Amino acid sequence: MEVNPEEYIKIIPPPPVVLISTLYGNVKNIAPFGMNMPISSHPPLYAIGVKDTRDTYKNILETEEFVVAVPGPDLIREIDTTAESFSREVSEFEKAGLTPVASKVVKPFRVKECQSNFECRLAWIKQAGDHYIIVGRVVAASIDDRIYRKELSRLVIAPVYHVGAEEGEYAGKGQLLTGK
Ligand SMILES: Cc1cc2nc3c(=O)[nH]c(=O)nc-3n(C[C@H](O)[C@H](O)[C@H](O)COP(=O)(O)O)c2cc1C
């Protein structure tokens, strides 16, 4: 079966949706991003694909900081709310009822309801087609104590996958297979 090259994204498993928290002055901005990946351990670097029309893009360019928060399947409605296009002066944290928690190193806030959060300082940006690759250096990271499992944490964290073209279409988690 041949598919349109511009639809290649539909024939690979999706990355988990993350929420990116940024600041516009005192306004706490947050939005979901499906284009995201870890790209280096030493130093720790994380990449996201962001359109330059997004407030997130403008905020990161101006402040050079952001927080990546990992939502679980219990936050589907909040993910959809934060994806709505509010004006830059409106906090999606408030609209979605998410709780901001002060970060350890950067100014943008972590998200209390998320399973893990990591704080990033902008490393570099490069245009890639209709998105910009934004690479952040991870300067602090935290995980909910209840799901911390040393090397297995990444398997226990429940992902949310964006599977449809439309908002509101998501898939849930895989299984942790353990012999213990
Ligand atoms: C599940 C999901 C994944 C998304 N992934 C991306 C993405 O990877 N890159 C992007 O630029 N926009 C993405 N969007 C759209 C933005 O989240 C949306 O335009 C949002 O309103 C941007 O908010 P902002 O203007 O506050 O940054 C996604 C939306 C949803 C619902």
Image: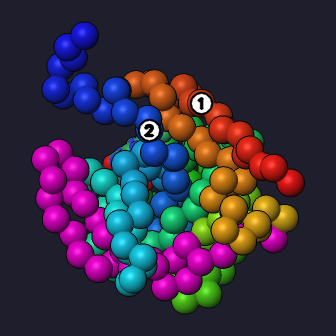
Q: Main secondary structure of the magenta part?
A: strand
Kindly identify which numbered label has been placed on residue 14: 2
Above or below, 124 relative to 53: below
The tag earlier along the polypeptide, 1 or 2, is: 2
Quadrant of the frame with the C terminus: bottom right
Instruction: Specify the segment rendered in magenta.
Output: 118-145
Instruction: Give the side of residue 137 with respect to residue 128, left or right.
Output: right
Would you say 142 lies left or right of 27 here?
right
Q: Residue 41 carries which label?
A: none
Nearer to the camera, 101 or 142: 142
Measured as percent of width and height from the top left, residue 18 is found at 52, 53
Decide if residue 3 is in sight here: yes
Ligand 1 occupies quarter: top left
Whether residue 27 is visible to the viewer of this picture, yes or no, is no
Residue 64 found in image quarter = bottom left
Where residue 8 appears, as percent x and y from the top left, is 25, 29
Q: Distance between the residues labelled 1 and 2?
A: 10 Å
Identify the residue at horizontal 48%, vertical 60% (top origin): 20
Label 2, residues with CA under 10 Å away: few <14, some 14-19, many ≥20: some
Marking on residue 171: 1
- Tell me the kind of residue under disc 1: Ala
